Structure formats: structure tokens, C-alpha cells
Image (cartoon, rainbow, N blue to C red):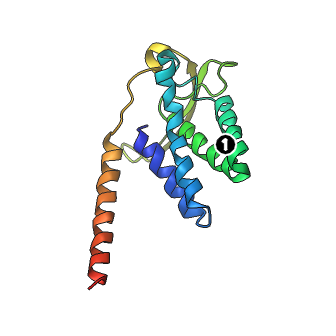
Amino acid sequence: MEPLIHFLVPLLLLVFLFPKLDKKIAVGLSLLTQLPDFDIFVVHDLHRALFHNLFFVVIVALIVAYFLGKTGFFVSLYYLISHLIFDSAEAGNALFWPLYNNLLGFKFAIMMQPKFEIILDFFSMPFNPGINAGEICILCQQGSLILVLAGIVLIAKCYTLWKNSY
């Protein structure tokens, strides 16, 4: 999953569902949605293992809790787990690494052709650094569409502000 999706979807959901949440915490901690992918820069062959596991998520959330309290803990936990959920639908994550080296994930689809079918398949496959440490798309199709939609909303907001000022 691309960084833009990892960033925008959890942030927008959090702000929409918890409007009373301090926006500084919500926006500031939203950068944590990018943290798991930094494992590719630390040890390239351990992408989807080193930072894509539950132990890492809990450790980072506890560090945030030390500085920002209970709210910071739950918001950071939400952001980091959202990253793992998004990546679970692709190649999976080594959720229990280093105790269990297999990638765990799921495939979900709703098919209309050739027949209506709902597919939900959980998988576990051996961790293979050559396959799992592949490319990271910085801006792919979904992100491009989000930028276009955000641009349209921004233009509409600017037009509304401009029109109301006269």
C-alpha cells in the first residue's frame, strides 16, 4: 500500500469518528502511519518483518504513552495497526517476528463476474526477503485519485471562502 493511503485514510477516519480528539495529537501522530515502512531502510531484507510486527507496534505505542499519556498510546496504536491491516491485504506481515517467521495476511474481494462471489481467504507463507523486500510505490493509482479529489475539495473550499467574502 502506498504512503498516501496509509496516511490519509486512518487520519480522516480518526478525525471524523472522534471530533473532540485534540487535532494536534491526531495530526502529529499520523506520521506514525509511515513508520513501519522505514524497516526497508534499516535492513532491506527484513522489510515486512522488522517493523511490521506486533512487538514493534506495542513498543512504539508505549514510548508514545510515556510522553503523551493514554490518549497518545491508543492513537499511536491505532495508526500503527492501521498500517499493518492495509499491508495484510498485499503480501502480509510477519506479525509475530522474530518468534514466528511466516507472513500472515488475507485476501478479500467481492466479485460480480462471472458470478457474484465474496472471497475471504487468510494465508500464511514463509518469509522470503527476496520477494518481500520489493519496491515501495510512493504515489500509485489510489493516491493519485485521492490527490485529485482533495484538489477538487480544496478548490471548492477556496471558491466558497472567496464568494462569501464579497
Question: Please, what secondary structure does the residue beneath circle 1 have?
Answer: helix
Q: Is residue 98 left or right of residue 9?
A: right
Circle 1 residues within 10 Å: few <14, some 14–19, many ≥20: many
* Residue 136 sits in quarter: top left
Q: Nearer the viewer, residue 127 or 138?
A: 138
Residue 107 visible in the shown view? no
* Residue 163 sits in quarter: bottom left
Q: Position of residue 137 (x, y in %)?
A: 36, 33
Q: Nearer the viewer, residue 51 or 118?
A: 51
Q: Which residue in the rendered view is the most extreme toward the bottom?
A: 166
Write the residue at 33% across / 39% down: 139
Q: Is residue 141 left or right of residue 42?
A: left
Write the residue at 54% across / 39% down: 83
Q: Which residue in the rendered view is the most extreme toward the front?
A: 67
List the residue tagged with mark 1. Answer: 64
Q: How many marks?
A: 1
Write the residue at 31% across / 83% down: 164
Q: Position of residue 10 (x, y in %)?
A: 52, 50
Q: Check the picture and name the quadrant holding the C terminus.
A: bottom left
Q: Is residue 143 left or right of residue 71?
A: left
Q: Please name the amino acid that badge 1 sits on.
A: Val
Q: Nearer the viewer, residue 94 or 57?
A: 57
Vertical comparison of 92 with 45: above or below: below
Q: Position of residue 66 (x, y in %)?
A: 72, 43
Write the residue at 27% across / 66% down: 155
Q: Check the picture and name the quadrant holding the N terminus.
A: top left
Vertical comparison of 49 with 108: above or below: above
